[in-house]
Amino acid sequence: MKYLCLVYLDAEHWNACSDGVCAEYVHELVAAGRMVAGEPLHPTHTATTVRVRNGEVTLFDGPFAETREMLAGFYLVEANDLNEAIRLAAGIPPARYGSIEVRPVRALQVEPNATAPYSNHPTGDRS
């Protein structure tokens, strides 16, 4: 089963963990056959939040919610169960400076004859 591990850091610790340290853990996950995808994110001041209400698109600079910890990146991992996903999340280096939210990934529930806009393939490829 796939689990999304969302990495949250506050501004003080945004760069506390080097890319090299994170890359080492990614290599461990790849070697163990547990890594599906993952990427670091730029700081929240580079974000744009999009809302659509009553057919009108509204844009906001920055993240949707003002919080102390901000989304810094993600790891999409393959794990046998939640306990294994938590163990993998605990190894993510930025966990020492912020927090990791672990959430199971679910498939879209569509009618058998409906055309789904995306597949379960990580790239959204429908082939």
Image: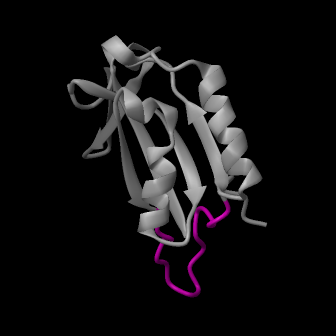
Query: In the image, is 121 to the left or to the right of 66?
Result: right
Q: Quadrant of residue 119?
A: bottom right
14 vs 88, nearest the viewer: 88
Q: Residue at x 67, y 62 (%)?
A: 121
Residue placed farthest to the bottom in the image? Answer: 112
Task: Give the vertical position of 104 relative to 63 (above or below).
Answer: below
Q: Which residues are magenta?
A: 105-121
Task: Give the vertical position of 101 relative to 69 (above or below).
Answer: below
Q: Residue 35: percent from the left, percent from the top? A: 66, 52
- Main SS of residues in magenta: loop
113 vs 55, nearest the viewer: 113
Q: Residue 83: percent from the left, percent from the top? A: 42, 66
Task: Give the vertical position of 79 relative to 49 (above or below).
Answer: below
113 drawn magenta = yes
Query: In the image, is 91 to the left or to the right of 61?
Result: right
Q: Residue 10: percent from the left, percent from the top? A: 31, 21
Residue 32 is at least partly visible in this image: yes
Query: In the image, is 100 to the left or to the right of 66?
Result: right
62 vs 91, nearest the viewer: 91
Scheme by which the image is coloured? one colour
Pick the quarter of the image with the C terminus. bottom right
Q: How many marks?
A: 0
98 drawn magenta = no
Q: Quadrant of residue 72?
A: top left
Pick the quarter of the image with the N terminus. bottom right
Q: Residue at x 28, y 27 (%)?
A: 69
Q: Residue at x 31, y 37 (%)?
A: 51
Residue 71 is at least partly visible in this image: no
Query: In the image, is 127 to the left or to the right of 44?
Result: right
Q: Residue 24: percent from the left, percent from the top? A: 68, 33
